[in-house]
Image (spheres, rainbow, N blue to C red):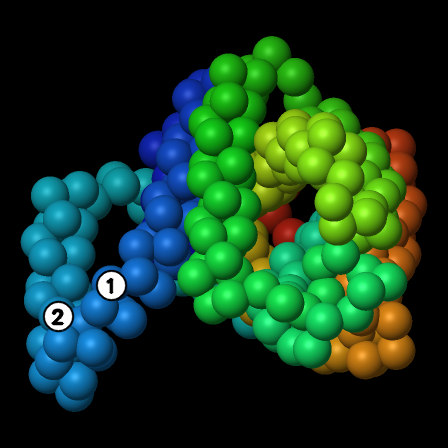
């Protein structure tokens, strides 16, 4: 992933608008890849058991063929991931503020994807509409619907890149996250027979998710923009995406367990609000930090970004 993102950052260096749209395409491909992978994995296992792994092998071969068509980036300064560079990079300016925000957002995603299905499948809780009583098929449809909304929202945001700074898109997305938390709380405490109220809240929640989906492509675009200041370390810069995506989701799944055990879905909503507030605070530091000089290389004695 760092190599792919480093290549995309280098290939779109000439156009901020194109870069935003390419990062949107990357994010859409990621979401669809996960969704199709989960679906195909279940079908392959049901029909072929261990033999289904030949399908995975075939996918790798096809992917290799697709990448062979891409060709070289012709960027002699494009380096591999440099772990020493991370140590220096994380002590400076916008990155120092961006990492906690990125961790917080991925923590929210990891928390919901880890615990939502379990909470919907356990014994019914009359006090919380979203806790218990849902079939496996219904839970699968919920996750499919969330994925579709994220894809649609991410594609819609593509038209904003180049016109709106990436940091502003992230800020707007985090505001939508605050509204989404409120909407979700209202939905969770709706009476089971209140069809109109539930429908309105579902529509409002979908709209908030559409806006919220802009955060990830904006974060990728932001990292790619910063990588222009350090062209010799593009791989390391873009590697921050995958490193802290994984770390954030692991931490979110762990943290969410305590909140879900104590307050079920209400606990997940509370944790979402807390992480969203922390991400907002970090974003304030990002927008106030002075920009780095283009082409500057980080070293152990480099000036702060």
The location of residue 58, given as percent across then percent down, is 9, 67
x and y, in percent, of residue 76 in the image: 32, 46
Disc 1: which residue: 40
Mark nearer the N terminus (1 vs 2)? 1
Residue found at x 41% / y 40%: 28
Q: Is 186 left, or right, of 229 in this rendering? A: right
Residue 112 sits in which quadrant?
bottom right
Please tell me which residue lies in front, 165 or 24. 24
CA gap, disc 1 and disc 2: 9 Å
Camera-nearest residue between 54 and 122: 122
Tell me where residue 160 appears, x and y as whole percent. 57, 17
> Which quadrant would the N terminus be assigned to in this image?
bottom left
Q: In this rendering, would 280 be left or right of 32?
A: right
Where 57 falls versus 185 (above or below)?
Answer: below
Q: Which residue position holds label 2?
A: 55
Determine the residue located farthest toward the top in the rendered image: 163
Q: Are marks 1 and 2 in contact (CB under 8 Å)?
A: yes
Q: Label 2's element?
A: helix
Q: Which callout, 1 or 2, points to the residue nearer the camera?
A: 1
- Residue for point 18% across, 72% down: 44
Question: In the image shown, does 51 or 198 lie closer to the viewer?
Answer: 198
Evaluate whether residue 147 shows in this view: yes
Q: Give percent across and percent down for residue 79.
A: 40, 56
């Amino acid at each position: 992933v760092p190599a792919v993102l480093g290549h995309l950052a280098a290939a779109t260096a000439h156009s901020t608008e194109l870069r935003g749209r390419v990062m949107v395409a990357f994010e859409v491909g990621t979401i669809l890849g996960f969704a199709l992978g989960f679906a195909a994995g279940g079908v392959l296992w049901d029909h072929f058991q261990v033999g289904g792994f030949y399908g995975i092998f075939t996918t790798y071969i096809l992917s290799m063929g697709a990448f062979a068509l891409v060709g070289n980036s012709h960027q002699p300064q494009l380096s591999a991931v440099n772990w020493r560079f991370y140590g220096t990079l994380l002590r400076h300016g916008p990155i120092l503020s961006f990492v906690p925000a990125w961790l917080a957002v991925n923590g929210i995603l990891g928390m919901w994807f880890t615990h939502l299905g379990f909470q919907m499948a356990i014994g019914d809780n009359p006090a919380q509409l979203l806790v218990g009583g849902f079939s496996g098929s219904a839970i699968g449809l919920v996750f499919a619907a969330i994925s579709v909304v994220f894809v649609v929202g991410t594609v819609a945001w593509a038209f904003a890149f180049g016109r709106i700074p990436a940091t502003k898109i992230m800020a707007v997305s985090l505001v939508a996250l605050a509204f989404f938390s409120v909407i979700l709380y209202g939905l969770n405490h709706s009476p089971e027979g209140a069809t109109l109220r539930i429908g309105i809240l579902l529509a409002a929640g979908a709209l908030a998710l559409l806006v919220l989906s802009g955060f990830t492509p904006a974060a990728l675009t932001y990292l790619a923009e910063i990588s222009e200041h350090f062209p010799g370390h593009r791989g390391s810069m873009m590697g921050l995406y995958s490193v802290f995506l994984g770390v954030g989701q692991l931490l979110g799944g762990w943290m969410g367990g305590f909140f879900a055990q104590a307050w079920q879905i209400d606990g997940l909503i509370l944790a979402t609000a807390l992480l969203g507030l922390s991400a907002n605070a970090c974003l304030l530091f990002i927008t106030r930090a002075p920009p780095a000089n283009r082409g500057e290389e980080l070293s152990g004695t480099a000036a702060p970004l």
